[in-house]
Image (cartoon, rainbow, N blue to C red):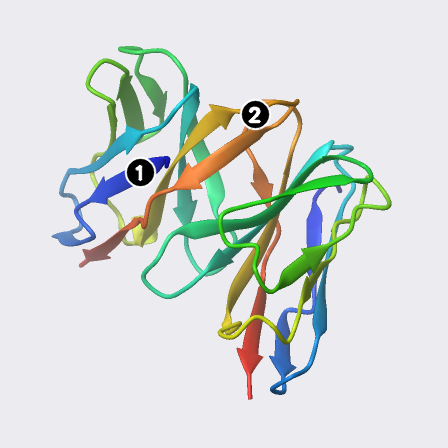
Amino acid sequence: DGGITQSPKYLFRKEGQNVTLSCEQNLNHDAMYWYRQDPGQGLRLIYYSQIVNDFQKGDIAEGYSVSREKKESFPLTVTSAQKNPTAFYLCASTAGYNEQFFGPGTRLTVL
Amino acid sequence: EDKVVQSPLSLVVHEGDTVTLNCSYEVTNFRSLLWYKQEKKAPTFLFMLTSSGIEKKSGRLSSILDKKELFSILNITATQTGDSAIYLCAVGSLNTGTASKLTFGTGTRLQVTL
């Protein structure tokens, strides 16, 4: 089955801690994206990557970092510099200018 | 800055009603407008619209785009409780590259009651 997987499903972070969210796809898509969703809000773009070893900041990149060492993988690190990280994080991928496919999401909570 | 505005923000209807959800946008280098349905977790794709005036239809759902007036509507006829969800509108813009960047609206929360 082709698709996008995200792990973990739930993640708890202590203040001052860095955490990494995993996103893997086997759809052979070139482009991958990370979004953040807060209650009552739409999706806001954090980072995106069009090809391996290249990525660009989205609208709310501060306090986050990414890497794209493999086509299939686009992990997101939430650093201690992100002051309000509690949110639902969604990863997506697309081939060209087609619709984006989304993973099941990771819900991050700061303790 | 690209902007997508959806209305209403929330809506409660009775099963069997017809609903119309609205999406207006201001985007540079417009490429496409997409509708997604989000229940508990990941948004699922409904429609992608690129041309004005051409209706896209899937069962009881349909959507149309007006590129002159910069809006789209999503219609749901004979609503069912399974249609209860957040409906997201997103607009794709052309990047300097191979992929489309999407700007999302805040969504319309639809609740269908018995």
Q: Residue at x 20, y 52 (%)?
A: B9
Image location (x, y in percent) of residue A28: 78, 33
* Within-10-Å neighbours for mark 1: few <14, some 14–19, many 20+: many
How far apart marks 1 and 2 lie (CA) works out to 18 Å
Dot label at residue B4: 1
> Label 2 is placed on what type of residue?
Asn
Q: Residue at x 74, y 50 (%)?
A: A74
Asked where in the image residue B40 lies, by quadrant, the reply is: bottom left
Q: Is the N terminus of chain B in the top left, top right, bottom left or bottom right quadrant?
A: top left
Image location (x, y in percent) of residue A25: 75, 44
Where A111 falls versus A91 (above or below)? below
Q: Residue at x 70, y 73 (%)?
A: A19
Viewer can see residue A33: no
Image location (x, y in percent) of residue A98: 57, 25
* Residue at mark 2: chain: B
Asked where in the image residue B52 lies, by quadrant, the reply is: top left
Where B48 falls versus A33 (above or below)? above
Q: Is the C terminus of chain B in the top left, top right, bottom left or bottom right quadrant?
A: bottom left
Please name the residue that numbered disc 2 is placed on.
B95
Circle 2: element type:
loop
Left or right: where B114 falls relative to A34: left
Q: Are marks 1 and 2 on the same chain?
A: yes
Where A101 falls versus B62 (above or below)? below
> Viewer-nearest of labels 1 and 2?
2
Given residues B67 and A102, the one toward you in this image is: B67
Q: Residue at x 30, y 26 (%)?
A: B62
* Within-10-Å neighbours for mark 2: few <14, some 14–19, many 20+: few
Asked where in the image residue A13 lies, by quadrant, the reply is: bottom right
Image location (x, y in percent) of residue A81: 60, 72
